[in-house]
C-alpha cells in the first residue's frame, strides 16, 4: 500500500508494511513500518540491470534511425511531431499495456521506423535488397 505523505495526500510516503502485526492495518493507530527498499539488494540489482539494458536498447535504436536522414526526418512528421530528430531518445512504447494491446498511432509509427532501420542495418550498404536476399 502507498501511504499518504506528511501532508495527508497520497504518494510521496513510500511503501508501507501491511503485515497483520503492524497495527495500522487493523485500525489500532500504530503507524506501519516503512519497508527497507535498499535492503532488497537482489531486486534493486535486477531493476538496475533491466534499466541499463533498456537504456542501451533505446540508444542503439535511436542511432540506427538517426543514421538514415529519411527515417530521421519522419520523426518530425505527423503523427510523431518531434521538433528535431535528435529529440527522440529511442523509446518505443510497449506492445501491451496491462492486458490491452497498445494500438497507438505513435507506437505504430515508431515501430515502423525502428523496423525499417533494423532492416537497413541488416543489408550491407551498396547491396540491393534482392542481391542480399539471394534473388
Image: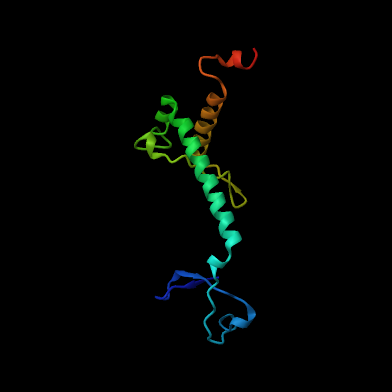
Residue at 55% from the left image edge and 14% from the top image edge: 128
Residue 86: where, in percent of width, then height? 38, 36
Residue at 46% from the left image edge and 36% from the top image edge: 62
Residue 29: where, in percent of width, then height? 53, 86
As rendered, which of 81 and 125 lies closer to the eye? 125
Residue 92: in sight, yes or no?
no
Residue 26: in sight, yes or no?
yes
Residue at 50% from the left image edge and 36% from the top image edge: 60
Residue 12: where, in percent of width, then height? 44, 68
Q: Image quadrant for the C terminus?
A: top right
**On screen, 112 above or below 35?**
above
**On screen, 87 above or below 21?**
above
Task: State the count of labels.
Answer: 0
As rendered, which of 124 and 87 lies closer to the eye? 124
Residue at 54% from the left image edge and 53% from the top image edge: 48
Residue that sits furthest to the left in the current view: 83
Which color scheme is applied?
rainbow
Q: Image quadrant for the N terminus?
A: bottom right
Residue 127: where, in percent of width, then height? 54, 14
Amino acid at each position: 500500500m502507498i501511504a499518504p505523505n506528511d501532508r495527508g495526500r497520497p504518494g510521496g510516503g513510500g511503501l508501507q508494511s501491511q503485515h497483520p502485526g503492524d497495527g495500522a492495518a487493523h485500525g489500532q493507530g500504530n503507524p506501519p513500518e516503512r519497508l527497507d527498499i535498499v535492503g532488497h539488494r537482489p531486486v534493486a540489482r535486477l531493476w538496475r540491470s533491466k534499466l541499463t539494458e533498456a537504456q542501451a536498447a533505446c540508444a542503439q535504436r535511436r542511432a540506427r534511425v538517426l543514421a538514415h536522414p529519411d527515417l530521421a526526418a519522419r520523426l518530425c512528421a505527423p503523427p510523431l511531431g518531434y521538433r528535431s530528430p535528435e529529440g527522440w531518445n529511442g523509446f518505443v512504447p510497449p506492445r501491451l499495456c496491462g492486458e490491452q494491446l497498445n494500438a497507438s498511432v505513435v507506437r505504430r509509427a515508431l515501430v515502423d521506423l525502428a523496423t525499417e532501420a533494423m532492416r537497413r542495418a541488416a543489408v550491407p550498404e551498396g547491396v540491393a535488397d534482392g542481391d542480399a536476399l539471394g534473388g
